[in-house]
Amino acid sequence: MITPIDNKITSQAQKKSALDLLSSLLSSFKANASTLSDDTLYQKRSVSGNTDAVSVTALSGSDIQSFSISNTVLAKKSILESGSFLSETATVSSGSGTMSVSVDGSSYDINYTSTTSLLDLKESINTVAGTKVTASILQTGANEYHLVLTSKETGASQNISISDSVGGTLNNELKTYDVSTNPTGTQSIQTASDASFKYNGITITRASNSVDDLIVGVTINLLQDGGSTNIGIAQNTTAISDEIKNLATSYNTLIKQLDDMTLTDLANGKVGIFNGDNTIKAIKREVTKMMTSVDSNGQSLAQYGIGLTEAGVMTFTQSEFDAKMSADPTGLEAFFSGSTNASGEYTEGVFGNLDALLNSYTDSTGLMSTLIDASKKETKSLNTERERSTALLTARYDTMTARFAMYDSIISKLNNQFSSLQQQISAMINADG
């Protein structure tokens, strides 16, 4: 009575697991189809011609083009180095005053006293002028410490200059170097300068080595002086073909599971968990129909290197895809992801249609959700039936146990009566003898 129900519960659990797996595989396949139906995939760009001296990046949707970059000269930061101090705790002045640091049209005042050390001055500069200048201390040798000021940005406007207030008492090491009057003063180690290069033969200058305002969506990064290269920006066909390969993998995994789940091989005694289930069989039929369909223009995926073998395995022929992409990239995009004609009418692409079909399976109110909910309800019903049957069996067992106990008591009494009767008969026989 219980075993048949247990078998049904086990079978339903197996079906639920199979449905969960099928739902997951359909979702993965849908994700691939959705990516291929999204026009942003076809807007991705690849860049050729990058070198150690010049590197170019292109955003999705930027114009397909080619250009030359030559005669690169890197933009530089301003670097000042003070004269030498005996230690980083050495004082920078014999009195009080204000040191001004000027850069990019702004001036920053740093107050000092007779107790201000080189280390104190460095920290004050970073606090007051830290958005434009970085101050550090460089030890070049024994008892040789230098204050180094470096501009945060590159470009000719970033040159740093320092000055002392009127009547200030900064040490000569922090005053501007002069070969005659202050040979131990602060010197410019590197002058800030703009970057320059030739774009298609036209000289371009910028304050930064990263140029993103010359071509819309394109950034040119200058990495070395004297660089020269020819840059090509093209549609990223690798991204598209990689997604097709992912789609083929997902499709083949899905179809293999559907075949196994609906298998009917009576000769070898093999049947799938959904053997004879036309609803599950219809999934494969509809998906395969979509993959082999021909649109109103006579186009099919097979023309783009995406086909099915006689065994139903999806294959991707890169050379056929590349040929189609090279001959008509716009047509390929229209067939794959859809297009709008001159009248404003939109025609969905093959992968958009596939995405819609798969959505009808994987949506929260779709087929798979319905089947999984039905399986859960069936399992719940079977468990309820099992509990009811178990309770009935228990009640019957209790009744039979009580009856057996009663019968056992009656038999025991009869045995006792029989034993007593035997004793009486034996006594009578002995008395007559």
Image: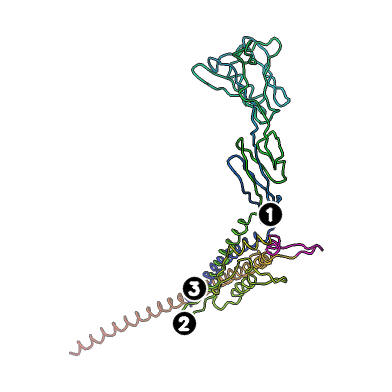
Secondary structure, mark 3, is helix
| Residue 416 lies in the magenta stretch | no
Mark 3 or 1 closer to N-term? Answer: 3
Q: CA distance from mark 1 to mark 2?
A: 53 Å
Q: Secondary structure at mark 2?
A: helix
Please report whichever mark, 1 or 2, sits nearer to the chain's N-terminal start: 1
Distance from Cα at disc 3 to Cα at disc 2: 28 Å
**Disc marking residue 152:** none
* 357 lies left or right of 5: right
Q: Quadrant of residue 128?
A: top right
- Looking at this view, is 254 or 369 the one in front? 254
Q: Is residue 271 left or right of residue 331?
A: left
Eye-nearest disc, 3 or 2: 2
Q: Which mark is nearer the camera, 3 or 1? A: 1
Q: Residue at x 60, y 39 (%)?
A: 53
Q: Is residue 118 above or below residue 242?
A: above
Q: Position of residue 258 (x, y in %)?
A: 55, 71
Residue pointed to by mark 2: 267
Q: What amino acid is found at the position of numbered circle 3 in the picture?
A: Asp
Q: CA distance from mark 3 to mark 1?
A: 56 Å
Residue 403 in percent (x, y) is at: 43, 79
Is disc 1 placed on a helix, strand or loop? helix
In percent of width and height, residue 165 lies at 70, 13
Which quadrant of the structure image shows residue 100?
A: top right
Looking at the image, which residue sits at the far left? 433
Q: Which residue is mark 3?
A: 6
Residue at 60% across, 36% down? 224
User: Label 2 is placed on what type of residue?
Assistant: Ala
Q: Disc 1 marks which residue?
A: 43
Could you say which is closer to the camera, residue 297 or residue 97?
297
Q: Which residues make up the magenta segment?
A: 329-346
Amino acid type at mark 1: Gln
